[in-house]
Image: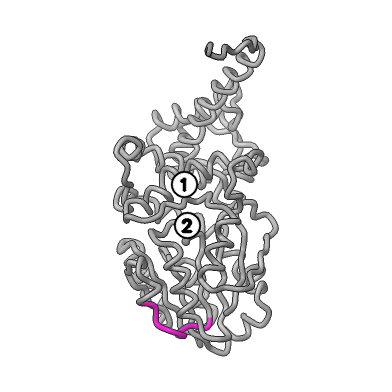
Amino acid sequence: MAPTVSTTAFDAAKAEAFANRLMAAVNDASFCLMASLGHRAGLFDALKDQPPLTSAEIAARAGLNERYVREWLGAMVTSGTIDVDTASERYRLPAEHAAFLARAAGADNMASMMQYIAIMGAVEDDVLACFRAGGGVPYARYPRFHAVAAEDSAQTLIPALEPRILPLVPGLAERLAQGIRALDVGCGSGKAFLKLADLFPNSTFIGMDLSEEATAAAGAEASKRSLRNITFVTKDLSDFDQTAEPEAFDMVTTFDAIHDQGAPLRVLKGIHRTLRPQGVYIMQDIRGSSHVHANIGHPMGTLLYTVSCLHCMTVSLAQGGEGVGAMWGEEMTRDYLARAGFGKVEKHELPQDILNNWYVMRK
């Protein structure tokens, strides 16, 4: 049988459009790296609400080296982020841009999120080796990940706890005020529970995470705040279905943590095991489908698959785990929850949170 030969004509216009898109992508990726630097160096904060300034004045305000600031400004000007007056060579950050780049923007601060691009790029060689030989990249190779995740939580999760997340469970805030026992699985640096421990001194809070660095930082912060109703534990949760204390907690939470686990189903079974009969489990996880074609058009789909490949999936595989990845999707999430014993699952979508689903479950 003769081989099939494609007769599809080469579409020059389509090729040119794609080439232009690639060129824009390279520029945008470069902007992300420089915006991350600007965020970390405090440059956007130094420029917010200021009149046009020279590079020397900006450097002085931020306490930085002028030569580096000047080169950074070049990237910001050519990306259309910062305006420059050609006659005076003074620079200004428009208020409309500062609204999404300065720390004062809170949850709208996109410069903070751009730190993930630099973090992911730093492990490219490690992940490439995994493409060839399998395996995964351990947490230890991501020295800044927990710090950036904590900053992200401080901007997005923490402000939403009282007004949006606790009300997902009617009466939960009142129960916390009276005093209950709560567990956060995969707590990272513990920002959410530190906030709750401060708000509800009659309740007892415990955070668990695989990372000793993260739990140590969380414990140090608890001591700094003189919070005596919270404890952080470093624990490998791969056998949590067997080691979880039965019916020990009135509330369990996971904040974008289950898909990172080496054995997510075992962790979920452990959560079911450790919940008291009237307990509640609140689970935040990435909004998406288990089917890639259904994620076409997702507003941050490419970013989420990238973070999954370069962090979530590979960290799980490094533990000898499943590596379900951040984009395991709602269908797989619901299947795992059902297999863990949760018969009824409520799903909520919070305003202005395009990245996550919020699931509420009881025994």
Residue 269 at x, y = what percent?
46, 72
The residue under label 1 is which amino acid type? Ser
Give the residue drawn at x 57%, y 11%. Answer: 5
Q: Which of the two residues, 280 or 96, is positioned nearer the viewer here? A: 280
The residue under label 2 is which amino acid type? His
Task: Count residues near mark 1 (Cα–Cα under 10 Å), then give few for <14, some for 14-19, many for 20+.
Answer: many
SS at mark 1? Answer: helix
Residue 105 — which label? none
Classify the position of the C terminus by image quarter. Answer: bottom right
- Which residue position holds label 2? 259
Residue 9 at x, y = what percent?
64, 9
Q: Which residues are magenta?
A: 243-250
Disc count in the image?
2
Asked if residue 334 shows in the view, the reply is: yes
Quarter of the view holding residue 225:
bottom left
| Rendered view: 3 above or below 306 | above
Q: Residue furthest front?
A: 1
Residue 36 at x, y = what percent?
47, 40
Residue 308 — which label? 1
Quarter of the view holding residue 106:
bottom right
246 drawn magenta: yes
Q: Residue furthest bottom?
A: 178
SS at mark 2? Answer: helix
